[in-house]
Amino acid sequence: MTTAPATLLTDTQRSEALARLPRWHRVSERDAIHRSIRFADFNAGRYASRNAAFQNAVSVATGIPLDLDGDLIRYRKSKGSGKVSATETAVLTLADKLAMTPGEIHRGLSDAHRLRFEDSTLYTRVFELADKRNGKPLPRATLPRIRLHSPKITRKLTTEWFATRVNRRYNRCMAKAK
């Protein structure tokens, strides 16, 4: 297959083309156009992948199934304030094996939204237990699996399903662009 050589558009041609391309903009001082594409973060938070992997490790270490949503504790402002999250409840069953008090566990989980959490005693000990039980190291990051709810959704869909689908479409588009 042969392709025609590229030619520069005139200012008028570029303006006409941009009028047909929503969200595209001319790059000032260059013969170029640009469009930014932003992907949804599902409101999962900055450390959601790491925290979902931690939840998986807790589940492996305890045998207690958990939603891998990246949310480790309930914060005061959330619904059900005063209640302990499913993740914290599961970690508390490991208190003796972790050689940690419930207060130390809660304080450790409270750092889940900080980088230092992955260097914490709680994080390290939970992964040590889970890796041993699993027979090999578990991943330290995984795609959160937050269940999507809507009157229009009639089947079980998660953010993992959505992100995988978006990634497939993106890759198909990029392949077509080559």
Image: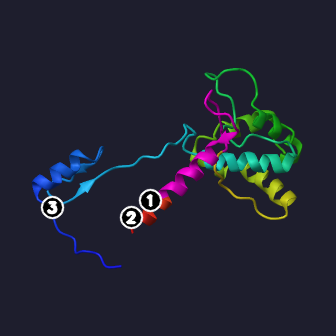
**Circle 1/circle 2 CB separation < 8 Å:** yes
Residue type (three-letter) at the residue carrying disc 2: Ala
Could you tell me which residue is drawn at 29 percent across and 75 percent down? Answer: 3
Numbered tag placed on residue 101 in the rendering: none
User: Can you give x and y, in whole percent of width and height, for residue 23 in the image?
Assistant: 30, 44
Q: Are marks 2 and 3 in contact (CB under 8 Å)?
A: no
User: Which residue corresponds to mark 1?
Assistant: 173
Mark 1 or mark 3: name the one nearer the start of the chain.
Answer: 3
Q: Is residue 134 above or below residue 78?
A: below
Q: Position of residue 73 (x, y in %)?
A: 69, 33
For the N terminus, which image quadrant?
bottom left
Reading the image, the residue beneath label 3 is: 9
Start and end of the magenta stretch?
145-170
Q: Residue at x 52, y 42 (%)?
A: 41
Residue at 66% x, 21% y: name it. Answer: 79
Under mark 1, the amino acid is Cys
Whether residue 122 is visible, yes or no, is no
The reply, left or right, for residue 109 in relation to residue 29 is right
